[in-house]
Image (cartoon, grey):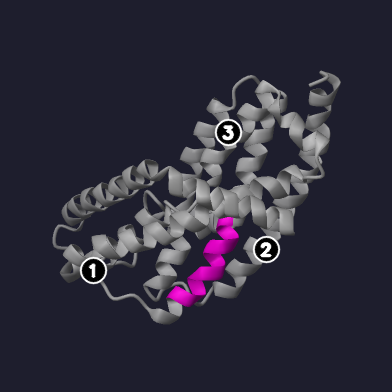
Amino acid sequence: MRKYLTVSRIAFMDRLAMRSELFFGIATAGVRLILARILWQAAFAGKAELGGFDLREMTTYYLIVSFIGQFDQSEGYAWEFAAEIRNGTFGKFLARPVDPLRHFLAACSGRSAFQILMACAAGLAWAIPFLPLLAPMDPVGVLLALPVLSLGLLGLGYVNYLTAIMAFVVQDITPWHMVKNNFIELFSGALIPVSMFPGWARAIIEATPFPALASLPASLMLGQNADGYLRSLATLIAWNAALAATCRISYARLSRSYEEAGA
C-alpha cells in the first residue's frame, strides 16, 4: 500500500500546482447554483413543493450537488490514462511492479482529496450570500452521506477506468466518454432530483450506483431518504464488487492487444 499512498500524495501535490482549473470549476458550480435558483423559482410559481422539496430545500439541494460534482477527478484522469495507452507510455505499468487499477484509483483519490477540501471551503463561501434562501442541513444526514458518497466515487472510479482501458481497442474514447458522462449526470440526479422521475424510472435509477453521486447524499443531508439507507449501502457495495471484477477481467483481455503490438 505504501507505493499507492505515494502515488496519491504526488497527485495531491500536483493539484496544488494546477490551481486555475480548480477555480474555474468552483466558479462554474456557483453560476450553476444561481441559474438553478432562477429556473426553479419559476417552476414552483406559487407551489408549496415539488418532488418532495420546497423552494429553499431545492436551492440547498443544488448548492450541495454543484459542489459534490467537483469531488470526482477520475473522469479527467481517464483521458490521461487513455492517452498513455495510445502513445505507448503505458509500458511503464508492464515494466514496474505497479497494478494499473490501483495506480489509477490512488491517483484519482489524491486529486479528489485536494478538490474536496477546496470545494467544501468554496461551498461555504457561496452559501453565505444565499443563507436566507437555504434550508438547514441535518447533521446526522451529513454523516450518513459520507459513506454513500465515498462508495459512489469509488464506483465512478471503476467506471472511468473501464472507459480509459477501452483505448486498448479503439482510437478515441471520446464518444463513449461523453455519452457515459451525460447518462451519469441524469441518473445521479445532478440535473433533476431523482424523486421527480416517474415511479418506474425512479426504481430503475435507484437500482444503479449513480444516485450516490448527487441525489442520495444531497437528500440525506436535507434529512430525507434515511429509511432506505441500508438498502442503498448494500446496493453500492454490490455494484462496487461487480465493477471491480469487471475491471480486472476487462484489463486482462483488452491489454493483450497492447502486448501483442510490442508496445
Residue linked to disc 3: 80
Name the residue located 21 percent from the left edge and 53 percent from the top edge. Answer: 43
Along the horizontal axis of the image, is 222 left or right of 251?
Answer: left
Q: Is residue 62 magenta?
A: no
Is 150 one of the magenta-colored residues? yes
Compare marks 3 and 1 and give the one earlier in the sequence.
3
What secondary structure is marked by label 2? helix
Between marks 2 and 1, how big is the CA–CA gap?
A: 32 Å
Q: Is residue 58 visible?
A: yes
Looking at numbered disc 2 in the image, what kind of residue is underneath it?
A: Ile
Q: CA distance from mark 3 to mark 2?
A: 27 Å
Task: Indicate which disc residue 134 carries.
Answer: 1
Amino acid at dot 3? Glu
Q: Residues within 10 Å of mark 2 (few under 14, many from 20)?
A: some
Please state which of the two labelled residues, at mark 3 or mark 1, is closer to the viewer. Answer: 3
Which segment is the magenta one? Answer: 142-153
Residue 108's tag is none
| 144 to the left or right of 207 | left
Amino acid type shown at disc 1 = Leu
| Mark 1, secondary structure of its residue | loop
Q: Quadrant of residue 51?
A: bottom left
Where residue 216 sits: x, y (%)?
A: 47, 64
Mark 3 and mark 2 lie on one chain; the one further toward the N terminus is 3
